[in-house]
Amino acid sequence: MEEIFLADNSLGEEFVVTLFGESHGRCVGTVVDGCPAGLELSEADVQHELDKRVPRTPSITSSRIEEDKVEILSGIFHGRTTGAPIAMIVWNRDVDSLPYERIKNVPRPGHADYPAMVRYGGFNDYRGGGQFSGRLTVALVMAGAVAKKLLAVERIEVLAHSLSIGRIQSKADLTREELRASVYTNAVRCGDRDAASSMERAILQAAETGDSLGGTVKAVVYGVPIGVGEPLFSSLDSELSKALFSIPAVKGVEFGLGFEASRLTGSENNDPLVIKEGKVTFETNNAGGILGGLSTGREIVAHVAFKPTPSIRRRQRSVNLDSMENTELEMAGRHDPCVVPKAVPVVEAVVSIVLTDLLVRSGVIPKVLKGSM
Amino acid sequence: MEEIFLADNSLGEEFVVTLFGESHGRCVGTVVDGCPAGLELSEADVQHELDKRVPRTPSITSSRIEEDKVEILSGIFHGRTTGAPIAMIVWNRDVDSLPYERIKNVPRPGHADYPAMVRYGGFNDYRGGGQFSGRLTVALVMAGAVAKKLLAVERIEVLAHSLSIGRIQSKADLTREELRASVYTNAVRCGDRDAASSMERAILQAAETGDSLGGTVKAVVYGVPIGVGEPLFSSLDSELSKALFSIPAVKGVEFGLGFEASRLTGSENNDPLVIKEGKVTFETNNAGGILGGLSTGREIVAHVAFKPTPSIRRRQRSVNLDSMENTELEMAGRHDPCVVPKAVPVVEAVVSIVLTDLLVRSGVIPKVLKGSM
Amino acid sequence: MEEIFLADNSLGEEFVVTLFGESHGRCVGTVVDGCPAGLELSEADVQHELDKRVPRTPSITSSRIEEDKVEILSGIFHGRTTGAPIAMIVWNRDVDSLPYERIKNVPRPGHADYPAMVRYGGFNDYRGGGQFSGRLTVALVMAGAVAKKLLAVERIEVLAHSLSIGRIQSKADLTREELRASVYTNAVRCGDRDAASSMERAILQAAETGDSLGGTVKAVVYGVPIGVGEPLFSSLDSELSKALFSIPAVKGVEFGLGFEASRLTGSENNDPLVIKEGKVTFETNNAGGILGGLSTGREIVAHVAFKPTPSIRRRQRSVNLDSMENTELEMAGRHDPCVVPKAVPVVEAVVSIVLTDLLVRSGVIPKVLKGSM
Amino acid sequence: MEEIFLADNSLGEEFVVTLFGESHGRCVGTVVDGCPAGLELSEADVQHELDKRVPRTPSITSSRIEEDKVEILSGIFHGRTTGAPIAMIVWNRDVDSLPYERIKNVPRPGHADYPAMVRYGGFNDYRGGGQFSGRLTVALVMAGAVAKKLLAVERIEVLAHSLSIGRIQSKADLTREELRASVYTNAVRCGDRDAASSMERAILQAAETGDSLGGTVKAVVYGVPIGVGEPLFSSLDSELSKALFSIPAVKGVEFGLGFEASRLTGSENNDPLVIKEGKVTFETNNAGGILGGLSTGREIVAHVAFKPTPSIRRRQRSVNLDSMENTELEMAGRHDPCVVPKAVPVVEAVVSIVLTDLLVRSGVIPKVLKGSM
């Protein structure tokens, strides 16, 4: 492979989110272009979302403690969005690059280290994964905070939670009120308190053995009007899955019954239409709120599978790129024994960004928020 | 929802595929823009791929028999691509719209009928699902035929097959040679002959009871160089999943171990790097050939879940939009009792289109095919 | 230059026009994606615009007589747009490629022949300029016909006319009524009848001497609301100029006073704001209806410069690419001694397409035309 | 106009430049995405270009003195680009917003004030024009500095200069060496020293009378290989003009002979092809290096017309939007009596960005700069 192509770090067509920054560089940041004018937005609004992601209990998350304090650089005037691009950054502070210097010629299994080195001809910033780091999700959460405020104006709400961690399953059918009340009250972002305790124990146990866990996040979106999405290539599921797979460690995405639907018959899987309070709706929601790429008016339901954290404290087999010999690698560094708890607000952010873009394009979210004046 | 947005029926950035046509309109067609100049391409090449999709055994596929004969309208000169857009169409011939007229005010469960009607203010062509019809996959296969020829120049091969139909599972670890030799020799596009027989029986049985089945398709890509894809929003998995979810009836996509990875530990899931014949590679391929959104040099492996055909011959509950009352619906029309067999070449086409776009952008596929002169 | 990139033959972000076809291929065509649903549209509507472009008096236009009869292939149902892509083609009939075979190794001065040959490695269709031919403007006019009908719903009208041909100038300040009444009543598409006669004579005279003329087209747009366009890269002037320079033979574009403004002082050039009938407007329109990339509410005024037709019947100097020697070239073929008359409806089409895209994106043109039901 | 659309402040497809910031906000900045890995790049490189734009002689430029010191926030590692997005900012320091508060309900003639207010529902940052300010050109110059360094690797050079200011004309046919040696040695960025003195006097004279001047900038690009650009909508002239019209105050763009070509005959205007030193070239360059949207191998030549600075110290007529009455306006504020000198490095930056994008897409600029290792 002689030449390799470079990145487009932007998402969206009208509400466009661009990311920049690296794990061990000066900052991570985002530019949100195309945000409607007139939305009240403060640094506190964004900080509120960032704080959902921030490590609180170092036992189950990375020992890297970042303040993650947002600064808004542009696009706000008199406390409201102006229609101009909104640039936001978080400065990196707690950075220890030393462990990465020691192993820079020994790619970490489960990470992008080796493909990235080949692709960028060795010029990539390998410290902490550089631009491939989960640290970039800080920027997603900042952009997502803007999207969430816009969706709130339309009474659309995105609620995610840990559905499973390792082999521990949460109850699946939590109500909107249960999700609102409980997800961010525990360290694992699970809406089922019993499962939450088991998940926390499982993570601590994996950490003690120098190992890590994966899990699944469920996202539910309430209040999306009928007909949002595109036939074919910009279908609602296409756009959501594209964005969800951009989150590091995601290996699977399904909507509604997903893979389970492939084992049912049509008569089992089809959701009947019914009249309810004078309106057309679907009695069941096996489709996860999406038919033919369009929203059905029912809640949008997605499951997202995360692999276990690739950084583990166990000795692993890898290669030394200098000597071109097999070797072993032991990671010091700091890492979460399970990324799922941090991923919950990230999934919320990503789903919010995609929906906002589709709704701005559609005119459902107006270009100037008159109601908010 | 006052206003609703409209479609962008194009996929790709440099190798750009645009679709047009409807199930019961004059034709389905595609414009492939950005195809490198100098590729040998004939109508026979495209026809060869179309014939893989075409119904052969009406028992297990739709009784609608289309000749599906491609006409190339532009972009070819002296038997080779010129670099100009390649327009291709298949005229629709065997169209019976009558059944759709009878039920136009009773949306079919499992179809986009109702969301589409809301979205397009009733102006959409509802006959056979219009632009939402699986018939549009004919155009995907035509465009995919061009992509496949380009990939072949780079010795990249995309092979898909039916991994499961209903509850019947194929053997999972078929070799490249087995896939090449057997998939298109049976009606269900399965590489495992025993499973193929069971699948065929299961489909016939579902059809007899007026019901339908779903299933999963596995795609494997051989020969992709290391480092293809983008960090973040244009990652290899992002772009593939976006395109795969644009195929009608897809409800889930996973790469490598996918959802199963979420239940493993890091030490179980990480693929060790090893030196093999003097080159760096990954010993196992739990990652499905993708790390951090970049290709690893191992085969790319994806699973795609299809729901059971929503059109069934059983009486189903729906609503009458004129009287706004609950009603029942019985579909005559023609439909496949299982879309999975037809979906196999469609998955191959879609994966080929996405990879070709990424490889044209990267320069791996050159813009003028000198070697082929 | 080792590798060269390929084309994106699409224009627009929401109302997207894709072109295909060649001068001497089977057809020229377009796919219009993102057209709002519910617009009445017939082949007669499109044909009406095509007929404005068609050669009527062979004396001043090409001796190639094409019927140019449009066929709509998709996107229309019950006489209205459905929201699905609208594909349209015109079959090529009167094609004589022989003259091009004779000179295929002698690039024509003033044409893209030589750069195209280098770029496409010799694989390009050189007959009549292939995809670089002015014949592609047939496709622009077809797409423009859809745009014009949409603009008419919003009472926006685009009127172009020949402002100069060679050194003959039309009166510049024709009224909207004069433009409507007279432009398409003469062969040179000039709104000033006296100038029209002189222009016609000048073209005939140039033709007699085997030479050709250029000229300028003025476009005026009535009824554009205030605030259309984008700051910076998608400003109204940016998007219009990009599209206008895509018309073959265009060498300059200016808005309002254009180059003349560069010689004035600020006090001469600034347009004062005034209250008129209770509304804010600009007293003069030196700005051509655009300030800061946004529409001002006054007419949008653009001048477009066309070079003289490069194909002339005189002996010209060129090179033989086989022998790599200087040589002389005499074109037989058919060509217009002046492209400006044909360019007038093309400029109208292109301006209409750009405005429609901006207005669909803005929501000024709704995504479903309810008023037209 | 009920709803109005919002901005996409990004330019380019592979080498993508996004701008943010406001005249009187915290900063102006840019994110450059898609820059090839391996380019040596320091803050000093960017500062060098910024210093070309900076006011040196307050007599002829704005009395607002900004330090304009660049900070690179991401994308550089060990002194080279990594392939990740390069974010750069300049903090605003010398900001006096008071004059704008006083006149916020009286739109300035010649500025976007009134259209912007309508479009953004009054939420826009009106201080100093907000995002419409010429101050955003600082960000263009930063991004252009990266592009220039990439072009230099390919031995491509972009040289602009003041061709006219008001009615004073520079000599037109300055050599590459004259341009390199003299343009940035005088305050008006003119390559003809005699004309430079006259221009300077003309600007001072306009300033004394409280008035302003416009002018034209000529850009010449040396070293572009044959065949760069696209047929139709991404032609070289289309992409350049789109970007040039995004510079505030530009009212006209032409290539080669431009508007003058419209008055010539074909035999006068066509550039003959000739063999020169064994290579095919064009004897003259009336086409300005572009045929059919592709580069010809000759220098690319563009003229860009700038209107006179709209901010003048004279009393002007406008309206009071509170009382809806005609009124008069006298601007204090700070402004350049002629924007052309500052525009010269901006034109260089913009042309460099467009060419770099096209050359990265084409593979002429490789995605990893191996030669520079």
Image (cartoon, coloured by chain):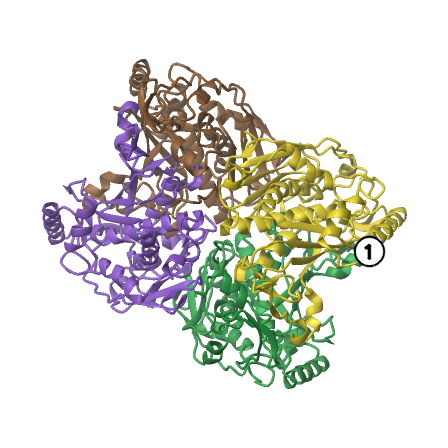
Chain colours: A green, B yellow, C brown, D purple
Q: If the image is split into quadrants, where does the N terminus of chain C sit? A: top left
Q: Which of A33 and C113 is in front in this view?
A: C113
Residue D120: percent from the left, percent from the top? 41, 56
Q: Nearer the viewer, residue B68 or A301?
A: B68
Side of B273 where A119 appears, left or right: left
Is residue A75 visible in the rendered image? The answer is no
Q: Residue A112, relative to residue C321: is it above or below?
A: below
Write down the quadrant of residue B174 in the picture: bottom right
Q: Nearer the viewer, residue A56 or C227?
A: A56
Q: What residue type is labelled 1?
A: Gly
Is residue D178 visible in the rendered image? The answer is yes
Q: Residue B302, relative to residue B55: is it above or below?
A: below
In percent of the image, x 43 and y 35: which residue is there? Answer: C350
Residue D198: percent from the left, percent from the top? 10, 47
Which residue is tagged 1?
A: B166
Q: Residue A265, relative to residue C10: is it above or below?
A: below
Residue A272: percent from the left, percent from the top? 79, 54
